[in-house]
Image (tube, helix red, strand yellow):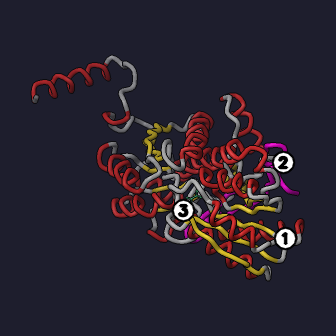
């Protein structure tokens, strides 16, 4: 056993000396002259539709920030707290990464981020939108994703201007940090707009049948349905609502912002409105460059791709601000100096509490695609 381990080690060293192919992420030590960044993404499980988009955005970002060298290690957090913790431990203790990107879900972040905070490893979230329980974990936790609290009030206001609703039926997932936090924000936004809630129903992530909840909500005859769900649940919810004869408007939260939602809901998705952190139509040079890079990569970009790509731009800028140094403390100090950075999301800065600061947009599904609402 011991002998085979030594042989393996010798073989790995020989491979490195010859400049052979890069060994798998698990066994490599930090690359010379480049920042080692671990990305914990949901590549499987309930949030897998976001993870694939995020990986594409990160990869394009790494190419576009050259000559800044980023050695990106992507691991699957499986959309769970448990796997998120395992991946963070590996990044912090074995890969000795300089910073972490992710994890995809707020739910996972609420469990994994405290490990990085304690170890003094900067974390840049690229899709966590729960207003509380993320950056307030501590000073090493940052994010480039706008919270639901920053997006939903404006999105609902715009939706009300367009659709003129006065009553709502609300459905939300009660077993996920993001869907619950999103619900809290939605409830307040509706109250502020003087919208009367005629009924509120809940579901859990593993549920596939929402007929009971939707029958109750549709039966109350609200002007609009409001849903806080991850894309996976959202597509079935919207499809089943249409099957029950719901032809009215549906307002979603950030979970809806994936093309996977539209693909799986099909025609039923038409008309759904949602606030978003990415204006796909932006003519800003940084967005045009991002769009060109995605085209070259053969990837159809979405909000999650744009936030991931922006995450790499931000880390590269932090390294630049730290005089080209990429130690954990260098990146932490550099992040504090990122200001008015041109990104696909717009001019980007952090708030004093390390949250994202830039303009949100609103989009609506039309002809099977998200279209920005002007
Ligand atoms: C969160 C989210 C998800 C919908 C996207 C990954 O916003 O968990 O915070």
Q: Residue at x 33, y 59 (%)?
A: 119
Residue 70, given in percent of the width and then of the height, sits at: 49, 38
User: Can residue 270 be seen from the camera position used here?
Assistant: yes
Q: Which residue is mark 2?
A: 366
Residue 195, given in percent of the width and then of the height, sits at: 78, 79
Query: Are dots 3 and 1 in contact, CB under 8 Å?
Result: no
The answer to which image quadrant residue 339 occupies is bottom right
N-terminal label among 2 and 1: 1
Residue 25, relative to residue 21: is it above or below?
below
| Residue 351 vs residue 295, the one in the foreground | 295
Q: Which residue is mark 3?
A: 336
**Cα distance in 3D space between marks 2 and 1:** 18 Å
Labelled disc at residue 18: none
The answer to which image quadrant residue 256 occupies is bottom right
Q: Which residues are magenta?
A: 348-374
In this rendering, which labeled residue sits more in front, label 3 or label 1? 1
Question: Is residue 75 on the magenta stretch?
Answer: no
Q: Residues within 10 Å of mark 2 (few under 14, many from 20)?
A: some
**Cα distance in 3D space between marks 3 and 2:** 40 Å
N-terminal label among 3 and 1: 1
Query: Are dots 2 and 1 in contact, CB under 8 Å?
Result: no
- Left or right relative to 19: residue 204: right
Looking at the rendering, in which quadrant would you find the C terminus? bottom right
Query: Are dots 3 and 2 in contact, CB under 8 Å?
Result: no
Q: Residues within 10 Å of mark 1 (few under 14, many from 20)?
A: some
- Left or right relative to 178: residue 1: left
Label total for image: 3
Q: Residues within 10 Å of mark 3 (few under 14, many from 20)?
A: some
């Amino acid at each position: 056993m011991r002998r085979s381990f030594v042989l393996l080690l010798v073989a790995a060293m020989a491979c490195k000396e010859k400049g052979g192919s890069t060994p798998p992420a698990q066994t490599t030590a930090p690359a010379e002259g480049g920042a080692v960044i671990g990305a914990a993404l949901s590549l499987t499980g309930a949030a897998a539709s976001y993870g694939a988009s995020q990986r594409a955005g990160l990869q394009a970002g790494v190419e576009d920030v050259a000559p800044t060298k980023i050695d990106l290690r992507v691991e699957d957090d499986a959309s769970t707290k448990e796997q998120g913790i395992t991946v963070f431990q590996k990044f912090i203790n074995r890969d000795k990464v300089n910073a972490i990107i992710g994890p995809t879900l707020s739910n996972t972040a609420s469990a994994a981020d405290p490990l990085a905070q304690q170890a003094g490893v900067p974390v840049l979230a690229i899709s966590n939108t729960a207003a509380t329980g993320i950056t307030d974990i501590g000073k090493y936790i940052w994010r480039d994703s706008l919270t639901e609290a920053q997006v939903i009030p404006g999105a609902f206001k715009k939706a009300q201007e367009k659709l003129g609703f006065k009553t709502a039926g609300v459905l939300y997932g009660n077993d996920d940090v993001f869907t619950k936090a999103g619900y809290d924000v939605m409830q307040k936004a509706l109250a502020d707009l003087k919208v009367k809630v005629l009924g509120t129903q809940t579901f859990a992530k593993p549920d596939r049948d929402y007929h009971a909840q939707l029958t109750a909500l549709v039966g109350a005859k609200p002007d609009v349905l409001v849903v806080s769900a991850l894309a996976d649940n959202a597509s079935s919810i919207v499809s089943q609502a249409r099957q029950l004869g719901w032809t009215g408007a549906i307002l979603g939260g950030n979970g809806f912002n994936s093309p996977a939602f539209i693909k799986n809901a099909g025609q039923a998705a038409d008309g759904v409105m949602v606030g978003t952190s990415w204006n796909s139509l932006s003519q800003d040079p940084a967005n045009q460059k991002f769009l060109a890079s995605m085209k070259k990569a053969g990837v159809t970009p979405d909000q999650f791709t744009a936030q991931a790509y922006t995450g790499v731009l931000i880390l590269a800028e932090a390294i630049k601000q730290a005089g080209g140094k990429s130690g954990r403390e260098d990146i932490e100090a550099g992040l504090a100096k990122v200001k008015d950075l041109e990104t696909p999301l717009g001019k980007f800065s952090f708030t004093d509490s390390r949250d994202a600061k830039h303009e949100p947009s609103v989009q609506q599904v039309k002809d099977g695609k998200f279209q920005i609402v002007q």
